[in-house]
Image (cartoon, grey):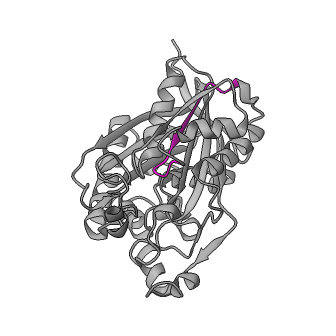
């Protein structure tokens, strides 16, 4: 009996037109291009300046492009999952706003929050709907307007984060697609990477605003160490489980948090750096959008049957890895 897999049959991306370069940041905080590039690998980032547009707008732009590229009728999509840590509002959810903006009236959707690992958690979730036979077409969107929760007076965080969105179409396949995943979550890092304000524990007050609790906070050193160890360890564990040597992987697709993290993970795994997708230099850390934006940027280089290893690490902490075989050649 054949096994149904969830194959990625199309990918789309969106980044805002406005660029925030390292030279621009030099005028805002005590930093410089050499300092930023040497520590993060980032040269520029995209900012969605329009205050009336947010994660749903960027996600909708991606979905429109994805539907066109895959020649899909919006009414044929069964489900849309949106991975985000910057929803337009607490409710209605961002997925429903994307569906509304695109005119998809025959679908349902929900949001998923797993910090920077959200796209991987969403991909694992979406794959189960396809594998079960419940749905034939599922769209997964990763969209974050990180500029909305970034303190641009804090030189340690404002150099990292950016705005953008990416989306993939998932459909059944007997040959290519989602093979396996391993995911983890704990709260060991809740004091090192968080957004304290805005939830039911710390709703908005004059005090939370004055204390900056509505901006993200990151203590870089412990997060860096945990990210490298977590991504490398789970990647090795997954590929051992799959019985596929790492040297047979065609592309590693890591969350674009920091170039030094990507390099350290590849070094720990003794993985060829030339086969690591890197887009952080021009897009920055877009949180849930980094992995689909990497696929979008590298799409023309991908070939049917390529073995891909996804890995990510996110706040508080979440981390994981996915092994997937690519389903088509080049750009659709």
Residue pictured at 46% horizontal, 69% vertical: 160
Residue pictured at 64% horizontal, 52% vertical: 296
Q: Quadrant of residue 263?
A: bottom left
Q: Quadrant of residue 218?
A: bottom left
Closer-to-camera residue (210/232): 210
Q: In the rendered structure, does residue 322 fall within the stretch colored magenta?
A: no
Highlighted range, magenta: 76-87
Closer-to-camera residue (122/97): 97
Q: In the rendered structure, does residue 81 fall within the stretch colored magenta?
A: yes
Closer-to-camera residue (104/14): 104
Q: Position of residue 146 (x, y in %)?
A: 50, 60
Q: Position of residue 9 (x, y in %)?
A: 65, 36
Quadrant where the C terminus sits is: top right
Count the numbered circles shown.
0
Question: In this image, 58 relative to 1: left or right?
Answer: right
Q: Is residue 327 visible?
A: no
Q: Quadrant of residue 215?
A: bottom left
- Residue sticking out furthest to the front: 206
Question: In this image, 285 relative to 240: left or right?
Answer: right
Question: In this image, 114 relative to 135: left or right?
Answer: left
Residue pictured at 49% horizontal, 38% vertical: 111
- Residue sticking out furthest to the top: 1
Vertical side of 177 occupied by 167: above or below: below
Q: Position of residue 122 (x, y in %)?
A: 47, 38
Vertical side of 52 occupied by 9: above or below: above
Q: Position of residue 258 (x, y in %)?
A: 43, 67
Q: Is residue 5 visible?
A: yes
């Amino acid at each position: 009996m054949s096994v149904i897999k969830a194959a990625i049959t199309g990918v789309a991306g969106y980044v805002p037109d406005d660029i925030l370069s390292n030279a621009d940041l030099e005028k805002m905080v005590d930093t410089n291009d050499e300092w930023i590039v040497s520590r993060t690998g980032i040269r520029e980032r995209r900012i969605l300046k329009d205050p009336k547009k947010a994660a749903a707008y960027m996600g909708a732009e991606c979905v429109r492009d994805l539907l066109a590229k895959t020649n899909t009728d919006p009414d044929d999509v069964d489900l849309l999952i949106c991975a985000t840590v910057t929803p337009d509002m607490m409710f209605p959810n961002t997925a429903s706003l994307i569906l509304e903006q695109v005119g998809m009236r025959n679908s349902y959707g929900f949001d998923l929050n797993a910090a920077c690992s959200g796209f991987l958690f969403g991909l694992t979730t979406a794959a189960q709907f396809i594998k079960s036979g419940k749905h034939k077409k599922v769209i997964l969107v990763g969209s974050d307007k990180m500029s909305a929760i970034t303190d641009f007076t804090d030189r340690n965080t404002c150099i990292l984060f950016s705005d953008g969105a990416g989306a993939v179409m998932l459909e059944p396949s007997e040959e290519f697609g989602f093979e396996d995943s391993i995911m983890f979550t704990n709260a060991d890092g809740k004091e090192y990477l968080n957004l304290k304000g805005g939830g039911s524990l710390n709703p908005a007050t004059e005090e939370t605003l004055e204390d900056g609790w509505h901006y993200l906070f990151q203590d870089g050193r412990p997060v860096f160490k945990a990210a490298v160890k977590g991504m490398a360890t789970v990647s090795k564990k997954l590929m051992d489980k799959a019985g596929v040597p790492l040297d047979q992987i065609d592309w590693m697709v890591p969350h674009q948090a920091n170039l030094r993290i990507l390099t350290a993970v590849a070094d720990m795994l003794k993985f060829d750096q030339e086969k690591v997708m890197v887009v952080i230099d021009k897009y920055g850390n877009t949180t849930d959008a980094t992995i689909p934006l990497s696929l979008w940027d590298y799409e023309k280089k991908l070939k049917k049957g390529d073995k891909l290893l996804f890995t990510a690490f996110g706040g508080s902490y979440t981390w994981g890895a996915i092994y997937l075989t690519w389903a088509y050649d080049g750009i659709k």
